[in-house]
Image (cartoon, rainbow, N blue to C red):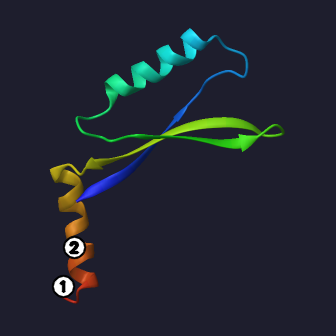
Amino acid sequence: MSSYIREFVKIDDRTTLDDAIDVLMELRRALPEGANAELRMRGDDIFGRHLSVCYMQPKAVEERATELPYRLAARGMS
């Protein structure tokens, strides 16, 4: 089971290409192994543009244990 993760990247409207690359490389180094991340740009000139990086991450044991009662209840096995 995996969780869908979306990280928002803050890059100023006017920045150097090197600074933008540095921010994205830092984010890539922080991603889990095999994340297969996807970069998206959203927004417009009025509200601004935002970059988001989306990827799937395996759930931790604690997360799966927390969800177990809800999954069992959904199957009628409570």
Side of 5 where 12 appears, left or right: right
Q: Residue furthest bottom?
A: 76
Side of 73 where 20 appears, left or right: right
The correct choice, above or below, for 41 with respect to 26 in the image is below
Helix, strand or loop at mark 1: loop
Tell me the quadrant of the picture where the N terminus can be found: bottom left
Where, by quadrant of the figure, is residue 64 drawn?
bottom left
Helix, strand or loop at mark 2: helix
Tell me the quadrant of the picture where the C terminus can be found: bottom left
Q: Amino acid at mark 2?
A: Pro
Q: Residue furthest right?
A: 46
Give 71 or 32, whichever is nearer the viewer: 32
Numbered circle sitting on residue 69: 2
Q: Are marks 2 and 1 in contact (CB under 8 Å)?
A: yes
Side of 37 where 46 appears, left or right: right
x, y percentage for residue 35? Answer: 30, 40
The correct choice, above or below, for 51 with respect to 71 in the image is above
Side of 66 where 26 appears, left or right: right
x, y percentage for residue 37? Answer: 38, 40
Q: Residues within 10 Å of mark 2 (few under 14, many from 20)?
A: few
Numbered circle sitting on residue 78: 1
Where, by quadrant of the figure, is residue 33 drawn?
top left
x, y percentage for residue 39? Answer: 50, 38
Which residue is located at x 51 percent, y 17 percent? 21
Which residue is located at x 56 percent, y 11 percent? 19
